[in-house]
């Protein structure tokens, strides 16, 4: 269910009205999104990727509509602090200093939805970590 | 020459005195490093990776000794702003909105030298971009 909704959302995001719809969803209605939330702050949400590409695949996304890294306002230090604080919290929570991790932000044609987001991933599965 | 020095540095970085030597080099003597500098601000340097793993492979590194993402001080907003401002400048300079890019920070066993650094990479070669 969660995955199908996500696939639909990804389809919509890349349609003509995608940016508008994403803006409404992320900024005003993010509480309706069926996400496994890990962290929520004033400025961002962090959740398990509905279609994980790695054994651990977390997405961190600002609540404000920011299309990509290129248009991140440089005076928005509250979001920057929230981002790095959340990443540090998740590193501890999932013991990523031991298993290894990558924090990734894709841009241009590498970005799949028109809303800034960071991936925090680990290539080591939870079984291998145990 | 640049590559051989880099290989030596990487070897030293992972030795017993690595953290100490990296600290001295990065904080007090970074002007001696034979790097192709692209940006230098109060808080960071950005340079072409001496051993690129991608057609475009830039490294952004704080001048202050910060071992990894986990210990990035959350009140160091000047570095965070410099980081994102530099990334935005490089996106424009290398037309990365067109060719695509990834901003990556590796941690734990995925990190190769004990000094925080971000990779800004593009999988599209300059020839393909032209």
Image (cartoon, coloured by chain):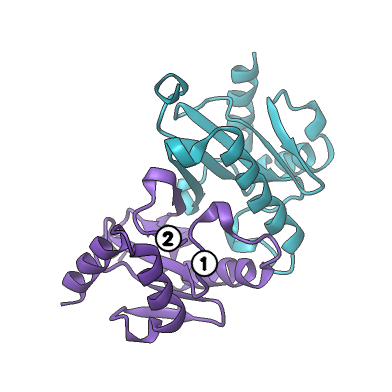
Chain colours: A cyan, B purple
Among all residues in the image, which is located at the extreme front?
A: B16
**Left or right: where does residue A45 sit relative to residue A50?**
right
Drawn side of residue B70 relative to residue A86, left or right:
left
Q: Is residue A28 above or below residue B101?
A: above
Q: Which residue is the site of mark 1? A: B87
Kind of element beneath mark 2 = strand
Q: Is residue B126 visible?
A: yes
- Asked whether the beta carbons under mark 2 and mark 1 sit within 8 Å of each other, the answer is yes
Sooner in the amino-acid sequence: mark 2 or mark 1:
1
- Of residue B130 and residue A80, the one placed in the foreground of this image is A80
Q: Which of the 4 image quarters holds residue A99? A: top left
Q: Is residue A60 above or below residue A79?
A: above
Q: Are marks 2 and 1 on the same chain?
A: yes
Give the percent coordinates (x, y) of residue A10. Answer: 59, 32
Residue bearing mark 2: B120
Assign a secondary structure to mark 1. Answer: helix
Query: Residue A119: which disc?
Result: none
Percent x, y of residue B84: 58, 66
């Amino acid at each position: 269910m969660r995955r199908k909704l996500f696939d639909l959302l990804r389809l919509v995001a890349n349609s003509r009205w995608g940016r508008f719809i994403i803006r409404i969803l992320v900024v005003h209605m993010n509480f309706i999104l069926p996400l496994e939330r890990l962290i929520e702050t004033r400025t961002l949400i962090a959740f398990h990727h509905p279609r994980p590409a790695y054994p651990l695949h977390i997405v961190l996304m600002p609540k404000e509509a920011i299309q990509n890294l290129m248009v991140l306002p440089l005076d928005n230090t509250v979001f920057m602090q929230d981002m790095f604080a959340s990443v540090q919290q998740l590193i501890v929570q999932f013991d990523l200093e031991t298993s290894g991790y990558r924090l990734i932000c894709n841009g241009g044609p590498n970005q799949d939805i028109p809303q800034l987001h960071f991936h925090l991933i680990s290539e080591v599965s939870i079984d291998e970590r145990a």
